[in-house]
């Protein structure tokens, strides 16, 4: 026979996929070839047919494979009128799970795995006890009886059993269970339909976690939609995340490896460093819990997905958070008033374990609302509260000239005094009627006591000059005032603010209402930003007409004037509350970082946040866990220990930085050097698998040898899963007589067996020899390859 080995770069075919471990205590639930109830009349069954209690007694029954058009069906079903075949066919099967079997699946915990082996032509949706568990070859969204599969099955895919590992936790129940399957055509004119299914379940042992640092979830990489995204399925970037529906549903969105998170983000308002529309968002008066937990009861915290830290030291978890309370212009929602204390919050918890079983929960972050809100800019004092000023109690009308800059106030009272250090300072004016000095709440703010002068007057005038070097530096003005009872403010002769004052005040006017003493002593801000055009470069004058309600009652007025600059106010590092973090719409976020205890061998986390108003939003992105590997036990640690590459750059598994035609992942799998081009190891061995014909027992046999990492493996070459599982690699030898169809297309297909023990090489790798289990006598030509697969497993 002619023997062909595929050329380097194709010889080892890398395929990103989700695989499952060899079944442990596997429980067969539905065997392939079983009998099914089916409906093949093209009718619209709505949604009731998938429920456990649906009456399917009128449906036909038959053994799988069910279908038509392939001439291998056990049960032929009705395809419908010529040229207008039915689009959808319905199948149901009941099976029993005893309480003892369910207990054995759950073991010491509630977690177990379901394995689906599905043959479908063209697409299918599978329901277990009324709940969708799998969708294959079908579009997203609602499926009905007219829906079409996304693509046609053809060639080997028509006869292939596709395997899917599904988290089974809580899906099976003791007693009767019901599988419901709808199979859809890709076209009304399709010539065939096929359906068969096998279902089993098994427990998985406790583990420290399959994933290894560095792990990173960047939602910008996870999708492109403005309002939803799906996790990336790239290598080691698809941890199983779940989230509660932010619209109020207590259910979960989708399943372990196929779901979307709804974010409802304000378009283009997520800020630099965050993906527009793709980062995790909490808003609109709802609590969100972002976690690695998959259970109906979020508070139970069963810690389903874990990261193995046993081979790592100096581990750190970090993530970005940004708050936003600037309103949503697209929805005509105005900016809010900041995040409220004890109502809005962010919480982050680390969960660590030394034995992979018992976990300790530690709160790393708990930020709530605080004083202030929105974007904060640096304020500069233009008129300080304690600067000297002049005051005048009018006894007749002196007009309005006193509000102008050039008015002569040399005869007015000085509002000033000496402080304890001999400095001349100013302050407010007022009095506490019939009380000794220093005994009233107004006293700390009164520099000039006017009780005697105002015994017959309700009005007093104040003038405060100030200088502005460059008025264009300011984007706003704020007058702060302590008031009992009212006032009118003027800037350079023009009215700019009023509080409890007549619309057209006279020289002897009183306030239009009273102000409580407890409020009067507080510095209340009045925005003058609409009067920026009244500000001048050089000298300016702030004039106040302060008013009391009636003659002889207590009185207070003290004020300050601040200009808001274009500079954003610096925040604390780290921010002390949500509003401290909320600084600016563009690019304002903070990266939190927390060390993980050195005693931790396994890690997971939970993240929780709440907003109570539509204007508020919290954004969470760029989660990362990093550590220094001690020895190689994964692709990531191999890159970090043996290369100078960054895992997200030249160290990416499909990159070939040394240009020898072998990707980094193939160099890793076969013991190569990613930084030195070539097809031989440091000891001169060929890196790529080698093939040969061996004569034995009067027959010809095909054998392959390949190098692989030296570590304990799982699986066998002739198992249903067809390969050696080592770290995050699966080595699968394959044979083909035509170079197109390979022999591992279905479980139980012809495969290989290992010959002898692995030979240990000088560079620390081992060489494995495997023989194709069928004699190649009579085969004119043959093809061999070793398929290298990213080995994924859903583990407890």
Image (spheres, grey):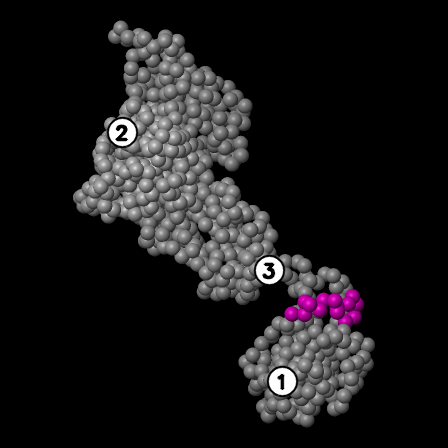
Residue 387 visible, this angle: no
Within the magenta stretch, is there residue 255? no
Question: How far apart are the two marked residues, 3 and 1, measured between alpha carbons?
Answer: 35 Å
Query: Would you call the spot at circle 1 few (<14 residues within 10 Å), some (14-19), or many (20 or more)?
Result: some
Task: Please name the residue that numbered disc 2 is placed on.
Answer: 76
Residue under circle 1?
512
In this rendered view, identify the residue nearer to me: 583 or 134: 134
Ranked by sequence position, the earlier of labels 3 and 1 is 3
Residue 138 horizontal/vertical position (percent): 40, 38
Decide: few, some or many residues near mark 2? Use Cα within 10 Å; few <14, some 14-19, many ≥20.
Answer: some
Q: Which residue is mark 3?
A: 375
* Residue located at (41% from left, 33% from top): 187
Foreground of the two, 676 or 233: 233
Q: Is residue 443 left or right of residue 115?
A: right
Determine the secondary structure under disc 2: strand
Give the residue drawn at x 63%, y 76%. Answer: 481
Residue at left offset 51%, top offset 42%: 224
Residue 631 placed where, x, y %? 41, 33
- Asked whether 223 or 723 is in front, the reply is 223
Closer to the observer: label 1 or label 2?
2
Mark 3 or mark 1, which is nearer to you?
A: 1
- Part of the protein shown in magenta: 527-540
Earlier-in-chain disc, 1 versus 2: 2
Q: Tell me which corner region of the image, top left, top right, bottom left or bottom right, holds residue 600.
A: top left
């Amino acid at each position: 026979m002619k023997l062909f080995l595929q050329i380097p770069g194709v010889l080892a075919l890398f395929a990103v996929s989700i695989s499952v471990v060899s079944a442990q205590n596997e429980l067969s639930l539905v065997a392939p070839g079983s009998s099914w109830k089916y409906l093949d009349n093209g009718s619209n069954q709505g949604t009731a047919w998938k429920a456990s209690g649906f009456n399917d007694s009128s449906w036909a029954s038959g053994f799988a494979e069910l279908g038509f058009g392939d001439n291998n069906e056990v049960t032929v079903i009705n395809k419908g009128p010529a040229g207008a075949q039915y689009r959808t066919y319905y199948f149901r099967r009941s099976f029993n799970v005893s309480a003892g079997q369910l207990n054995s699946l759950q073991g010491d915990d509630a977690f177990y795995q379901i394995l689906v082996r599905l043959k479908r032509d063209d697409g299918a949706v599978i329901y277990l006890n009324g709940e969708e568990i799998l969708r294959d070859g079908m579009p997203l969204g609602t499926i009905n009886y007219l829906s079409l599969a996304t693509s046609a099955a053809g060639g080997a895919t028509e006869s292939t059993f596709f395997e899917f590992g599904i988290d089974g936790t809580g899906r099976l129940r003791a007693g009767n269970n019901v599988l419901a399957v709808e199979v859809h055509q890709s076209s009304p004119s399709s010539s065939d339909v096929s359906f068969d299914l096998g279902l089993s379940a098994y427990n998985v042992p406790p583990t420290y976690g399959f994933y290894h640092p560095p792990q990173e979830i960047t939602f910008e990489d996870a999708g492109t939609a403005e309002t939803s995204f799906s996790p990336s399925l790239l290598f080691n970037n698809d941890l199983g995340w779940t989230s509660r529906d932010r619209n109020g549903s207590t259910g979960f969105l989708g399943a372990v490896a196929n779901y979307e998170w709804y974010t409802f983000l304000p378009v283009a308002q997520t800020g630099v460093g965050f993906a527009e529309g793709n980062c995790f968002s909490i808003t609109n008066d709802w609590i969100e819990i972002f976690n690695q937990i998959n259970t109906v009861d979020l508070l139970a915290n069963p810690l389903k997905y874990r990261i193995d830290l046993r081979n790592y030291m100096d581990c750190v978890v970090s993530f970005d958070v940004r708050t936003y309370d600037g309103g949503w212009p697209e929805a005509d929602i105005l900016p809010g008033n900041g995040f409220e204390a004890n109502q809005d919050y962010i919480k982050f918890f680390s969960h660590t374990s030394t034995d992979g079983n018992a976990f300790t929960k530690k709160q790393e972050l708990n930020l709530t609302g605080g004083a202030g809100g929105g974007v904060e800019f640096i304020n500069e004092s233009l008129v300080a509260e304690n600067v000297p000023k002049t005051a005048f109690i009018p006894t007749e009308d002196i007009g309005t000239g006193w509000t102008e800059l050039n008015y002569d106030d040399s005869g007015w009272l000085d509002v000033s005094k000496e402080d304890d250090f001999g400095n001349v300072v100013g302050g407010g004016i007022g009095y506490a009627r019939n009380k000794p000095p220093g005994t009233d709440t107004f006293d700390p703010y009164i520099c000039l006591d006017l009780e005697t002068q105002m015994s017959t007057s309700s009005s007093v005038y104040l003038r405060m000059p100030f200088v502005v070097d460059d008025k264009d530096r300011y984007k706003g003005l704020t007058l702060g005032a302590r008031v009992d009872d009212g006032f009118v403010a003027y800037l350079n002769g023009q009215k700019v603010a009023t509080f409890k004052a007549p619309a057209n005040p006279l020289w002897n006017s009183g306030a239009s209402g009273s102000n409580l003493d407890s409020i009067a002593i507080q510095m209340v801000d009045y925005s003058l930003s609409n009067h920026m055009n009244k500000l001048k470069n050089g000298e300016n004058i702030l004039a106040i007409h302060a008013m009391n309600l009636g003659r002889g009652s207590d009185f207070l007025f003290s004020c300050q004037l601040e200009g808001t600059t274009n500079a954003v106010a610096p925040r604390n590092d780290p921010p002390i509350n949500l509003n401290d973090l909320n600084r600016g719409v563009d690019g304002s976020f903070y990266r939190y970082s927390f060390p993980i205890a050195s005693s931790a061998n396994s890690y997971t986390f939970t993240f929780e946040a709440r907003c109570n108003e539509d204007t508020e939003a919290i954004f969470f992105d760029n989660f990362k866990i990093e550590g220094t590997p001690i020895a190689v036990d994964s692709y990531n640690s191999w890159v970090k220990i043996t290369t100078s590459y960054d895992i997200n750059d030249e160290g990416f598994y499909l990159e070939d930085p040394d240009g020898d035609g072998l990707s980094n992942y193939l160099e890793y799998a076969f013991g190569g050097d990613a930084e030195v081009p070539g097809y031989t190891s440091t000891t001169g061995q060929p890196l790529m698998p080698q093939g040969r014909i061996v004569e034995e027992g009067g027959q010809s046999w095909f054998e392959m040898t390949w190098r692989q990492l030296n570590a304990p493996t799982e699986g066998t070459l002739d198992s249903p899963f067809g390969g050696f599982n080592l770290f995050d690699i699966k080595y699968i030898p394959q044979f083909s007589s035509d170079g197109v169809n390979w022999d591992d297309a279905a479980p139980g297909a012809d495969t290989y067996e290992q010959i002898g023990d692995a030979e240990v090489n000088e560079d620390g790798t081992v060489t494995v020899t495997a023989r194709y289990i069928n004699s190649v006598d009579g085969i004119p030509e043959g093809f061999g390859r070793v398929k290298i697969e990213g080995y994924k497993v859903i583990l407890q």
